Image: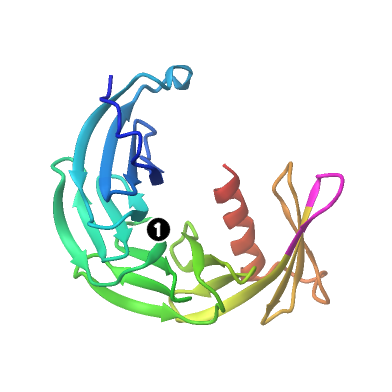
């Protein structure tokens, strides 16, 4: 059984490993806890601590990863080996509210309180591209499973989808509204195709409603469909 945490040390973020066997979480004191979890989720209290280390001098704002754990704070971002607890790389950027690796683990994205989304190379550890457009701090970021697109959400009440290969904005999600019957979710997009998209909550299938509705689904709609499936799983 894991030792109890300091009850005054609030959990600020968490990430689950790909095999669902361990959880890493950061705290307000800058600590990172890595615990092994019994695969039987009926016994969630059956956990044991594997690693405990000081990651930052400030609260841990975000974390992501598996064998390599990326953590963010008001001071900087750090990449850790979860097996040894050793800091492998330090990124000078600070204030990332959300971080996410691409599917291959070669890049990661940061969504920051300066309203900018950034993509970074893991090796060599360097900044790759920045995306500007949001009018308030970013809250979340997520890669498309093919690694080509990045979705971000902001406190400006919009979401945006970015093309990482072309370093450009693909779409602005300006509104999201759920129908009263709970079956459909409708979103308004301002982009190259000025789409209005509706998808069903049950089957998770995207339906395109736009002047081009009769045409073949665009790359944007395909990306949205995959994002929806990825987020709702």
In the figure, 190 relative to 231: above or below?
A: below
Please state if 41 lies on the left or on the right of 193 as rendered. Answer: left
Tell me what residue is drawn at x 58 percent, y 67 percent. Answer: 155
Comparing 205 with 40, the one in front is 40
Comparing 204 with 152, the one in front is 152
Q: Secondary structure at mark 1?
A: strand
Please state if 158 lies on the left or on the right of 115 as rendered. Answer: right
Tell me the quarter of the picture where residue 57 sits.
bottom left
Quadrant for the N terminus in the image: top left
Outermost residue, front side: 8
User: What percent of the width, then of the height, locates residue 128?
Assistant: 32, 77
Is residue 202 found inside the magenta-colored segment of the image? Answer: no
In the figure, 172 relative to 122: above or below?
A: below
The region drawn magenta spans 176-184
Please state if 51 lies on the left or on the right of 219 as rendered. Answer: left
Q: Name the residue tied to disc 1.
A: 100
Is residue 179 found inside the magenta-colored segment of the image? Answer: yes
């Amino acid at each position: 059984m894991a030792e109890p945490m300091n009850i005054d040390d609030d959990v600020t973020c968490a990430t689950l490993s790909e095999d669902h066997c361990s959880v890493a979480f950061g705290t307000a004191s800058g600590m990172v806890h890595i615990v092994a979890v019994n695969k039987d989720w009926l016994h969630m209290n059956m956990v044991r601590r594997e690693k405990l280390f000081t990651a930052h001098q400030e609260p841990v704002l975000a974390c992501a990863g598996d064998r390599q754990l990326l953590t963010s704070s008001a001071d900087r971002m750090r990449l850790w080996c979860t097996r040894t607890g050793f800091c492998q790389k330090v990124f000078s950027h600070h204030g990332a509210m959300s971080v996410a690796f691409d599917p291959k683990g070669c890049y990661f994205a940061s969504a920051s309180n300066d309203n900018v989304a950034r993509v970074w190379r893991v090796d060599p550890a360097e900044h790759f591209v920045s995306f500007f457009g949001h009018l308030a701090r970013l809250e979340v970021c997520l890669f498309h499973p093919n690694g080509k697109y990045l979705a971000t959400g902001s406190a400006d009440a919009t979401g945006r989808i970015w093309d990482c290969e072309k370093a450009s904005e693909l779409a602005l999600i300006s509104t999201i509204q759920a129908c009263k019957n709970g079956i459909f979710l409708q979103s308004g997009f301002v982009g190259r195709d000025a789409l209005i998209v509706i998808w069903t909550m049950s089957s998770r299938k995207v339906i395109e409603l736009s002047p081009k509705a009769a045409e073949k689904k665009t790359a944007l709609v395909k990306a949205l469909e995959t994002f929806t499936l990825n987020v709702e799983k």
